Image (tube, coloured by chain):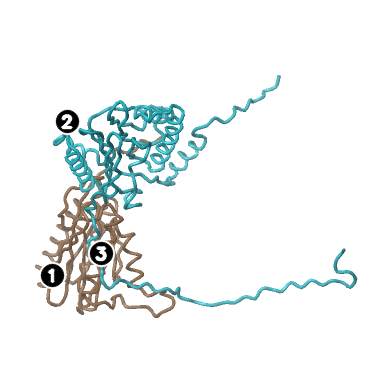
Amino acid sequence: MKEQANWSPYDNNGGTCVAIAGADYCVIASDTRMSTGYSILTRDYSKIRELAEKSVMASSGFQADVRALQKVLSARHAIYQHQHNKQMSCPAMAQLLSNTLYYKRFFPYYAFNVLGGLDNEGKGCVFTYDAVGSYERVGYSSQGSGSTLIMPFLDNQLKSPSPLLLPAQDAVTPLSESEAIDLVKTCFASATERDIYTGDKLEIVVLNASGIRREYMELRKD
Amino acid sequence: MGKAAVDVPMKGGFNFDLCRRNEMLSSKGLKSPSFLKTGTTIVGLIFQDGVILGADTRATEGPIVADKNCEKIHYMAPNIYCCGAGTAADTEAVTDMVSSQLQLHCYHTGRESRVVTALSLLKSHLFSYQGHVSAALVLGGVDVTGPHLHTIYPHGSTDTLPFATMGSGSLAAMAVFESKYREGLTRDEGIKLVTEAICSGIFNDLGSGSNVDVCVITKGQTEYLRNLQSPNPRTYVNERGYSFSKKTEVLSTKITPLKELVEVIEGGDAMEE
């Protein structure tokens, strides 16, 4: 029998992230609980980071790898700004994130990311990733421990009943900003009920033409 | 003399025949089905007039909450209750079984059940299953010999203690007990301490949550306080609610009529008498 390693470089700090794109806004949200095993490390940890003026990333998974990834992207963005004299657009940041993740294909960042922002036309955009950089532009997405609970509900509320029946819809969802925030709050309140790794507090970041805004909501602490 | 294999008759208990097959399957990568564990905080303490038991109400299946409000304080006898942590089916089954045995014993002796009887029945059952029955229990009650509190481990060992905690939240709860417990607590002080210990487990242990159940047992009276505290209400309810379309989309319709089976009876008598 081959001997198995009894030390792993990874740990899972839990948590859930969600992003929803609108016609002229984008909502990115995550809970603020950081845990390990059955214990809570802190109830007040932000998983969301602004990478550029119009790009916000939320990541769940192993927070040490998430922090390292955020630093790499911030550094690369600083270089881009020096070389091009402008901020990176959200689709450009999306590709950069994908390439950065695939660069470590054989020792991956244990990070489950969702990137939200405004594209070059000012419309909301959301990009969803796996741990090694496969990405896709979507109208909404969730990642993390509560994603299996939240995704079916978002599909039910936001997606057309059958993609075969109706004509293909735009990547953007026809919700107003306040409706989207309402939906996000319900998603997290529900996920908190059934997922032990999600809870404590909800951090919501809203990106629109007027800039970036933050909102918080209390969640169950048990 | 032939090589006649004598078939040994099946004894009761666990059948380990499939263990080799299961090991082979999991080495090939098959995930074995998970059990519903109670990932719990359960406590007990002895106070002035008897025993107080406490428990949280969350049952988990891995990282998912299977039951937000289950009952972990099980009835054994009118004067004896038992909190259970570990595999939910095991704690339920073992406490039900010993409760029945106690009742029969009661009728046989004509006396009120004693806590040590329940203790002996539980520990011998768990020991004989060599730890495969995954039940960790806090047994408490008041009988003619006075108040008693015991902990019972899955392999069958027991401890007799003035205060005890078990389950994944046991360390969080024990921290509270070790700081604030003293002998000769009054009823209200005892209930307050038990709820504090369970709340410590509920908020600091991810395997425990939801509400606090308490059971106060004194000479001649037992009070089962279900959901004594509910410190975890849902934080957000959308007033307008959400709509879910009742219809399933019809993509295409194809109707196939069933062929009619016609029986041809060749003249004569269709049926016999």
* Callouts 3 and 1 close, C-beta under 8 Å: no
Q: What is the spatial separation of the Cα atoms under label 2 and label 1, in whole angstroms?
A: 55 Å
Task: Determine the chain carrying the residue at label 1.
Answer: A
Q: Of the residues shown, which amino acid type is indicated by label 2? A: Glu
Instruction: Bin the neighbour count of mark 2 within 10 Å (Cα to Cα): few under 14, some 14-19, many 20 and up.
Output: few
Residue at the spot of label 1: A213
In this view, which residue lies farthest toward the right? B268
Residue at the spot of label 2: B183
User: Which is in the foreground here, disc 2 or disc 1?
Assistant: 2
Q: What is the spatial separation of the Cα atoms under label 2 and label 3, in whole angstroms?
A: 51 Å
Labels 2 and 1 within one chain: no
Instruction: Return the mark for residue A18.
Output: 3
Q: Nearer the viewer, residue B182 or B79?
A: B79
Pinpoint residue A145: horizontal percent, then vertical percent. 29, 55
Instruction: Bin the neighbour count of mark 3 within 10 Å (Cα to Cα): few under 14, some 14-19, many 20 and up.
Output: many
Q: Of the residues shown, which amino acid type is indicated by label 3? A: Val
Pinpoint residue B216: horizontal percent, then vertical percent. 27, 40
Instruction: Bin the neighbour count of mark 1 within 10 Å (Cα to Cα): few under 14, some 14-19, many 20 and up.
Output: few
Give the quarter of the image for residue A148. Answer: bottom left
Relative side of B20 to B6, left or right: left
Q: Of the residues shown, which amino acid type is indicated by label 1? A: Arg
User: Which is in the foreground here, disc 2 or disc 3?
Assistant: 2
Q: Hue of chain B?
A: cyan
Depicted B270 relative to depicted A174: above or below: above
Task: Determine the chain carrying the residue at label 2.
Answer: B
Element under disc 3: strand
